[in-house]
Amino acid sequence: MFKKPVEAKSMQRLSGADKKKLRRTTKERFPQASDADIDAILPLKAEITVAKYPNRVHVYGVEGSFPILFDIDGRGTEIFPTVYALWKVPELLPAFLLKGGEVSRYVIGGADLMFPGISIPPEGLPPFLAGQPWAVKVPGNPAPIAVGTTTMSSAEALKAGLRGKALRITHCYHDSLWESVEGHYVPNAGFLEDVVVEDPALFSVSQLSDASGDASSSLHGDKVIEKGEADSDMHTEKDVDAPQDVDISNETCEEVVAADMSGLKVSDNVRAEESNNEKEQQTISSEEVDFLLDKCLLQALHTSVKDKDLPMPGSTLWSNHILPCRPPGITLDIKKSSHKKLSKWLLAKSSAGLISAKEDKYKKEVMLLAVNHAHQDYMSFRPEKQVVETADQRYDSSVGEVRHAKQQLEVAEIYKPSTHVKPIFTSLGADAGKYYSASEASEIVFSYVEKENLVKPSDKATVVLDAILCDALFKGTIKKGSTYPTEIHKKDLGVTFLNRLQAHHRVSRGNDVAVRKGAIRSIQIMTERRQGNKKVTRVSGLESFLMDAELLASELQKKFACSTSVAELPGKKGQHEVLVQGGVIDDLAKHLVDHHGIPKRYIEVLDKTKK
């Protein structure tokens, strides 16, 4: 509903009578909410505003603060809380718990919630009816990430074998409603750019509860989360810089904790240990955080980061690889390091030559491109023997069919040595006739630098070029009469070397493997109007991903209940396009991603029907 930004056509304050009516409607809509909960999201003395949009949606907010409620039809019958409201009162709605943080990517990306992505408790699903408002949460994080409407009742869901769509998402973290106000914030450090994971601040609390004998037998996950939330109120406000008028009430949190903790016996030793842990977290220096970050990065590079997964977004590296490598009971907070930001830290590691990282100007995120396995820090590090739990292991095969499809298709950018760089490979005894990944090729050139001792003594980040390396990098690219460079920065060495290799790509699907020269061509999807003002959608470039056009046409005919046909592209023998009647450009692209595992970056869409 809020996938695209829309300008409000009017905004006004509610009168006293309208505010009372809104409170009554909200109480009726959320019967489990207490008066204190309603007061938290609709303060009695605050001014309430309503923004009216062209699509009939009404958005209510506390003046000068954040949107609190939205009404999708403007009639008061379909009111939902925003994520900002749920971060104030997390139990305002019942919530489905995802099977893992990685599933949140699909919800944040605009997909509805499917039953296979939900963690079913041992006692089974709680009863619910179709059309009820429910929230969505990630394991280990108390703050909901989305709200929506149930598509069927619990009885109907059981009859369907817990398959199909569970929740039609109406609003989620990172959509246009969340982004519509200045100073939008996140409730904890588990909320990343494109995924939500467990709250790192709760990690030490959960470890503590597992270690304590009396508490572990009676302390349940939900209660740990609520206590962690209460204990970390100050941490959240400090780190996120939430505005003062967004008051996450400490009193409310303390009441919740008191109610849930009543009757529990926690020993004095546990309390003392907890206070000691808090003290240690408060006194840890930025230098110690830097050391811990570097250690976790090296551990991840050795154990869980694979060359086939590169390039990798920085947020994925952080949540899926670095955080799982932290020592037990330790909270890892990038803001407490000397770098303050994940992007700055990764770029600093890139400048040092350990990794190759670059900011993607379109995604506005730093991408991990390659790992320098020949770097001194990498070679001298001895990884600890521990089981590193990746996101793929944390969430179950329930996201099921999607992940299975993606595993079937593998796309890799590979490189073959050209005549320019063959002397480098020959010098190291490496095979100049085989294919290399980007990281393997970078490792070759850095191994050569180490073998020939070409690092500049006065500047460890600079490499001095000998005759062989200079020719490999620049012969034929320097204009006649110009001077050849004598040195190069480490961060530019790997990229420059890769540019001198012959780019290829390898695509494998099941037992079929194809290696072709050049970069892989994207799939093109285009919708256009034809005679009679009818829309038709064309998709081509399927051969690049070992897909059969006839089989896809038959599949799409059943999926979209429309006619399809296959035609050979003019002047391109052996290449075909599939024509689908109707404007299904978005659904078709999603189908290729979800059911055929085509990475989004290899799909180009063009809608010629839009002006």
Image (cartoon, rainbow, N blue to C red):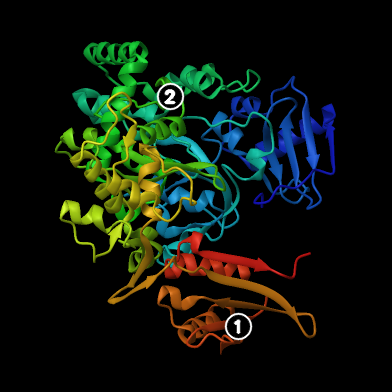
Residue 305: tell me if it is visible.
no
At x 72% / y 22%, what residue is drawn? 44
Residue 183: tell me if it is visible.
yes
Using the numbered discs, state the Cα–Cα distance from disc 2 to disc 1 in whole angstroms: 51 Å
Decide if residue 290 is on the left or right side of residue 230: left
Front residue of 7/140: it is: 7
Looking at numbered disc 2 in the image, what kind of residue is underneath it?
Answer: His
At x 40% / y 50%, what residue is drawn? 474
| Circle number at residue 476 | none
Across and down, in percent, residue 20 comes to 77, 30
At x 37% / y 13%, what residue is drawn? 282
- Identify the residue position indicated by label 2 in the image: 339
Q: Relative to residue 539, is residue 88 depicted above or below?
A: above
Q: Secondary structure at mark 2?
A: loop
Decide if residue 367 is on the left or right side of residue 267: right
Looking at numbered disc 1 in the image, what kind of residue is underneath it?
Answer: Leu
Instruction: Quadrant for the C terminus, please.
Output: bottom right
Across and down, in percent, residue 271 comes to 28, 13
Across and down, in percent, residue 545 comes to 42, 73
Across and down, in percent, residue 236 comes to 49, 23
Q: Secondary structure at mark 1?
A: strand
Say which label, 2 or 1, has the lower sequence index.
2
Q: Relative to residue 252, is residue 342 depicted above or below?
A: below
Front residue of 554/275: it is: 554
Front residue of 149/103: it is: 103
- Identify the residue position indicated by label 1 in the image: 579
The outermost residue toward the front is 481
Residue 261 position by quadrant: top left
